[in-house]
Every structure is written in structure tokens, then in C-alpha cells.
Amino acid sequence: ANVHKVLLPTLARPEGSQPSVMLSSATYSRSASTADSSRGLSSANSMGMSSRGFVLFVGGKKHGFQAQFKHHTGRQRGIVTQSALLGGLMEKAAALNAERLARKEGDKLLGSQKPVEELKGFPVHVLETKAKQAGLLLEQSGVLCLRGALASETCDELLGFINQESDQAKQAVLGGSEVFGERFGGVNCRGLEEPFGRRQDMFLSVEDPMVTRALIEAIGNLAPLLEATVTREGMLHEISCLVADPGSPRQCIHADTIYLPCPQYPVPMAPLYTFFFAVQDVEDGMGHTTFLPQTHTERAHELWNTTPGQKETFVASSAAVISSLKKGDVAIFDSRLLHCGGANTSDKRRVLFYFTASSAQRWPLSDGLHGSNSVRKEDLWQWRLCDFGM
């Protein structure tokens, strides 16, 4: 279910798996290193890559490698071709190029025309009387921050659980008892250290009591907003966590899903909203998330998916806000919104617990193509908000 989110240029294949060559398919997601969409790939660097593979760009044109490397689980062994043998070199080159692009975006583009501001947060209790206004703000700007959405004690327990689960999941993958793609997803600019890098998207299971308790508390505290945006029958599309260890690089600006409908995929889709919960104080240097408000629209995606020069102009002219989250705070954003995680230059691990919900019960494209799919296969499209007491 998560095949399409694994990026070979920035994410190692599972132990023992091999890549095979398939026709390229443009997409972009949490895991994409550069923006591309159903309207076509674009890249600000010599090598662009999508979340389904890579394309070599020379002089602004695509050349040669109009193929993708498809991720295979331990049950789906690929056939190594001559082109696939270049995968390792191309992966490293693409990852280094993506990190270079991310640094350029952070150092030279964001804030060059408009100052980067802090994302304003509102106490979660405002939802008791102003849920509709909060929902409207989220709909219009694409991002909203609420303070105190999870209790401090819950955050402490959840942080300890995720850290332990991270160690166990990595050992299980390294030992061969579990497949990488069934526990971890692709992630934008994860770092070059094999096989996990320094940034991981680790799926969490609803079967774990800690995860269930956290979901019940979070959904309960956010119930008025959730009712106003996705309703109590809304589906959980993702249940996961983001772990950024010290040394994790800055991410490229990206959106987690494409805008639908679009010319290539003329099917409607209700918004997906992702909820990033800080389970610790996210201090400066640990990698705050930067959001570009109002870039979740069809027009913004058209401007984003243009030539490299035009895209840089678009980024430089866009407003940007940083989510300086404290323990228990949540940053909520439309999955189509452009955003990126900052580099973790501290000596502390940053952990975000998250879920994604939508009034749509399914992602309309087959196999989750271009969608948000960070979820255990046994939990995929199995849980509605009402299942957690809402």
C-alpha cells in the first residue's frame, strides 16, 4: 500500500530487495525531494526526482532516464537491469542535489521578499465557541496552530513509546523479520546514512494501546474543529510519526498530495488535513516546520510546477510561517500546502506524532497514487473518527 511513497533517491530499499525499471510517473508527496505533479515535472537543479523515481535534467530538459525504480517488498523481488545498476550512484547524487536545493530555498529564497513569521497559535479551548471560524481559517490559509491539544503527561508517554518503537522497528528491519516499507515510509531529505538516514516516517499501529489513547485524547480535544471540517464520519488516512535525529538535513519545499481535480486526473477529492503534534518542546535548532500559507490552491500548484526560475520567484514572493511548537501543540495543515522541515542542528531528537483525516473515505487514485499513505497496511482506511469516541 505504501509502494508509491518510497523514494530511492532519498530512501534505502529494504534489505534484500531489488529495483526494477518502470515507466516514470510524476507525483509529489511528503517524500518528494522536488516538486512535480500530474501537470509535469519541474526541477530547480540538474537532477530532478519524483517520489516514484528520478529524471535527469540537462539544460532544463529531461533526458535519458525516463524510467522509475519501483520499490519492492521482500515478497516482490525485482529484476536487476543494466539501468538499475546505476541506481546507487543516482540515488546518492539525487539526495545530495536535493539537500543542496533545500539549503538554497532556506538561505536565499524564503524570506527574501517577505519576512518569515511565527505561526500564530490559539488555545485549543477556543474551539468550544469558535470551531467554525477556526475551520474557515484552516480552509482559507491552509494551516492552523492550536496550543495544548495533548496533555503533557500524554506527550511524555508518547515520546517514550515512539523512541522505543523506533529502536525495535529498526532492529526488526535489520534482522529481516520485518520489511522496511511496512514500517517506514519515504521521506524528503532523510540524510545519506544507510539504511534509515537521520529522518524517518514511522507508521504506528492502532493496536498499540498508547497510540489508541493518544488518538482518543487528540480527537476528543479537537472534536469541534474535526466536526466542522471532516465530520465524525471522517476517515483516518494516516497514523504515523516523524523522527528527526540530530544531523537531519533541511527538507526541500514540497506538498504531500497533488491538487485534484487536475487535467491528468479529473476526479474530485475532499481536502486531507494532517495534524502534527509536538510531544516535546521543539526548540530552535531542532527543525521547525515552515509552511507557505495559501499554497494549497489550484493556482498555487500551477505556479509551483513551472520552470525552475519561475518556481524560485514563486517561493521568494510567497509568505512563510514557522511553527514553533511546544509540548502538546498541534500544527494542522491541508496536505496540498507547500511546507518543509528544518535541519536538526541540535543534539536532541525531534519527534512529531501525526494523523491525517478527510471526509473522503478513500483516495480516488489507484494504489494511493499521489496521496498520503503513511499508515500500517492493517489500518489502511479502517478507522473513522467516530471509532475514537467522537
Image: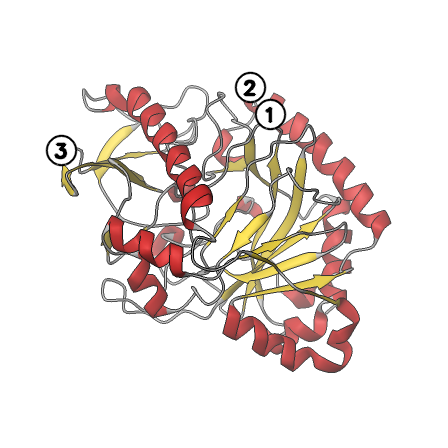
Q: Earlier in the sequence, mark 3 or mark 2?
A: 3
* Element marked by disc 3: loop
The crowding category of the residue bearing disc 2, from other C-alpha atoms within 10 Å (few below 14, some 14 to 19, many at least 20), is: some
Q: Identity of the amino acid at label 3?
A: Gly
Q: Are marks 2 and 1 in contact (CB under 8 Å)?
A: yes
Tell me the quadrant of the picture where the N terminus can be found: top left
Q: How is the image coloured?
A: secondary structure
What is the quadrant of residue 133 in the picture? bottom right
Q: Identity of the amino acid at label 1?
A: Lys
Between 179 and 344, the residue placed more toward the observer is 344
Q: Identity of the amino acid at label 2?
A: Leu
Residue positioned 24% across, 24% down in the render: 84
Q: Is residue 345 shown left or right of residue 110? A: right
Q: Is residue 334 shown left or right of residue 226? A: left
The residue indicated by pointer 2 is 174
Alpha carbon of mark 2 to alpha carbon of mark 1: how far? Answer: 6 Å
Q: Which mark is residue 170?
A: 1
